[in-house]
Image (tube, helix red, strand yellow):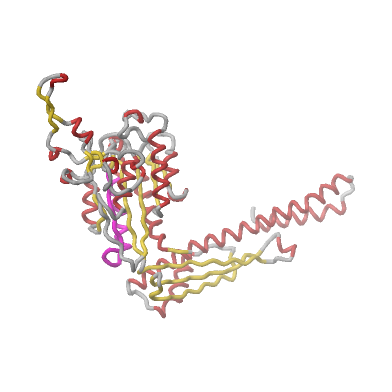
Amino acid sequence: MPVTSIANQFRRAVSRFPGATQGNIAVLFGLALLPILSFMGAAIDYSRVNTARSSMQAALDSTALMLAKDLSDGKITAGEISAKATAYFNGLYTNKEAKSVTINASYTANTSQGSTILVNGSGNVTTEFMKVAGFPQLNFNTSSTSVWGNTRMRVAIALDVTGSMGQDGKMAALKPAAKSLIDQLSALAKNPGDVYVSIIPFAKDVNVGASNYEASWINWADWDDDNKTCNGWGWGANCTPKNHNTWNGCVTDRDQNYDTLNTAPTGGPSTRFYAEQYNACPAQLMPLSTDFAALKTKIDSLTPNGGTNQPIGIAWGWQSLTQSAPLNAPAEDPSYTYKKVLIVMSDGLNTQNRWPSYGNGQTQFNGQIDARQRILCDNIKAAGITIYAMHVNTDNDPTSAVLQYCASGSDKFSTVTSASQIMAAFNSIGTSLSKLRVAR
């Protein structure tokens, strides 16, 4: 029902109370009803204003981003900003209740934050209820700032490639969706080094590359015990570990509490990464790179196998953003500010990690893997890294509480229930990442 119709009905109802003769109850009810209706009316008016302001904020954000792109691409000059801002905004802002809407845009080049576009907007909404109290209209205003040139982005993408990803068309849908995200990220790079991306396929383990078998950051203790050749039987057997060059490149969780940290593996054995000859070793990870074609080729190489250990993928995503061994992220230029992002996509619940008492590959025991993951995600977020989490839930499992917990806010967690939704979910993340350049 239109707001004006509601207001008219209220007025007619209130006008009937002075003539009521049925008794005191009607009068008392009328006296009580008036302030109640006033509060309700005020809430309705404020809700309309908030809707108009929220719509304006979204339009201003998009306007600022498009102006920044046009300027950086040389499509417009500084003198054309105001006219272009008005044209973009008018095409985006569709709220019908906002009146006297005005916007203005200003451009500042080469500040300490980089080049900046500030877009301000204001307007008002005619009230239906509050005007009886002397407020015929409510004003609102908001703004959006787009900063570019001095901001760079580094994104780690941790992808679940466990056996269940081979079901329900999930892997087939993941590949084009993840490659589309790479395209979105590459479009944000105007100069070399503006955007780096890493790809971390994970199952129970992560594959860091068999060529690293001589690296000092590998812990061979478990691998040597599990991969040896013995002559004789029982206590008299003479056993020799196999040559490390036969290792397939997989590593599992570090000792606690290093499993939840990005500490460089330069201390004792517990800081190092345990080699494991995991029989479902995923495709080798790809550290931060600006070779977007190679990143997409890596995505095409993914095959599903193994059990689910989200913390190992998340941990190595963090390692890929870290400027120390083992992955040695490129040095950061002090002339720029850096925004770091970790995206984790998984289609199930944690089932196993390095410790058999935590899970058997089918079932997690007592939530112990999730507990380690929560600590890990807390540490990553405390380091200033934004986490996006996606649960691909085609099996009607409970929504992953631990992935929800890991996400840096409810707007950075998504759940999809069919393979056909994966593309839209990744595109939404890409759009959100482009808006990380907007400062309100």
Query: Which residue is found at the position 34% from the left and 49% from the top?
Result: 423
Is 40 on the left-hand or right-hand side of 90?
Answer: right
Q: Dividing the picture into quarters, in which one does residue 437 lie?
A: bottom left
Q: Is residue 197 magenta?
A: yes
User: Of 134 and 153, which appears nearest the observer?
Assistant: 153
Task: Name the residue furthest bottom.
Answer: 79
User: Of 32 and 147, which appears nearest the observer?
Assistant: 147
Whether residue 301 appears in this view of the structure is no
Q: Is residue 340 magenta?
A: no
Residue 28: x percent and y percent? 84, 48
Q: Is residue 237 above or below residue 398?
A: above
Is 32 on the left-hand or right-hand side of 188?
Answer: right
Query: Which residue is found at the position 51% from the left and 67% from the top?
Result: 143
Task: Name the residue furthest left.
Answer: 231
Q: What's drawn in magenta, residue-wise? A: 174-201
Residue 271: x percent and y percent? 29, 43
Whether residue 394 appears in this view of the structure is yes
User: Of 382 and 230, which appears nearest the observer?
Assistant: 230
Residue 312: x percent and y percent? 31, 41
Q: Is residue 118 above or below residue 132?
A: below
